[in-house]
Image (cartoon, grey):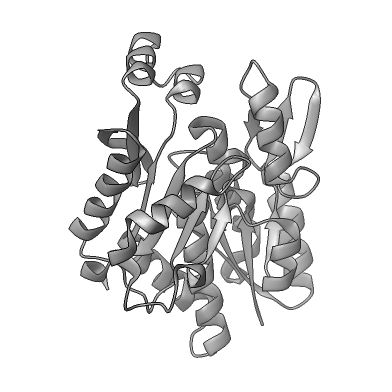
Amino acid sequence: MIKVVIDSGSDIVFEEAENLGVTLLPIEVRFGEEEFLDGVNLSHKEFFEKLIESDELPKTSQINVFRFEECFEKLTKNGYEVICITLSSKLSGTFDNAKEAAKKFGEKVFVVDSINATIGERILCELALRLVKEGKLSAKEIAQKLDERKRGIKLMAVLDTLKYLKKGGRISSVVAFTGELLSIKPVVAVEKGEVKLIGKAIGSKKGNNLLMQLVEKCGGIDFDMPHALAYSGLSDEYLKKYLQDSEKLWKGHVKSATEIPSYMIGSSIGTHVGPGAIAVAFFAKANA
């Protein structure tokens, strides 16, 4: 028997994890003196409500070695081999902690650095579940397959505001002010495990068009593999607009845009991008 373990940096929430049959380890989120478990006692909607009201950015804590050991101990005692998928090691110490914890369990626990986050991490988890269900590979072989295929995952997003990147100290106040004044929509991507600014556009429509061009530049979406869209904030209005603007990407592959899996971004990435972001994650055809 094989069990997949995932952290909440994937934006999979507790109830969904139960339905998928995966074990979810939540990241801790702190707003001032208040502490929450991401996706467990703090929904993504509640997170954005608090983020919008708060003057300071919340703090997130990596999952420590003890929590991983406790999880691996329980699962292996119940007869499972474990595949643990984590948030990018370039974005969090969670992967290193999982690797440290796994040392006690030898060939029973395999840890995979997703080199990704949010829906990029999610679709790697979905591939893992698909391979487990097929029942053709051992846990070790599945972990090796995930390590091979993860480099084909593309995660890109167009942001509505530079405010939260400024709050987090990732851009200067001058750049943020100029960007807001000109209605600049930055386009970011996860590349080699890190978040990079890959383009800028004036206005949301041009931002969506730039995102579509960048998807095409990657070789397009492999619709036979897991893929997903995500949005941040309290409304999916921008997501609906993006689906209209990028219709040619989906047409002919799905009956309607409503068939494309879409999710709400949570605290790990939402802290930095703020509300109004639209993300797309997929396995690129060129890497299939």
Q: Looking at the rendering, in which quadrant would you find the N terminus? A: bottom right
Residue 189 placement (x, y as % from top left): 34, 44
Residue at 50% of width from left, 72% of height from top? 259
Compare residues 186 and 136 and report the one nearer the observer.
186
The number of discs equals 0
Q: Looking at the rendering, in which quadrant would you find the C terminus? A: bottom left
Compare residues 226 and 145 and report the one nearer the observer.
226
Residue 65, quarter of picture: top right
Does residue 18 sit above or below 25 in this rendering?
Answer: below
Compare residues 180 and 226 and report the one nearer the observer.
180
Instruction: Say if residue 68 shows up in the picture.
Output: yes
Is 104 situated left or right of 257 in this image? right
Residue 243 placement (x, y as % from top left): 41, 58
Residue 218, quarter of picture: bottom left
Residue at 63% of width from left, 17% of height from top? 56
Residue 210 placement (x, y as % from top left): 25, 45
Compare residues 92 and 189 and report the one nearer the observer.
189
Does residue 174 sit above or below 246 in this rendering?
Answer: above
Residue 272 placement (x, y as % from top left): 51, 31
Residue at 43% of width from left, 66% of height from top? 227
Instruction: Say if residue 115 shows up in the picture.
Output: no
Is 25 situated left or right of 274 in this image? right
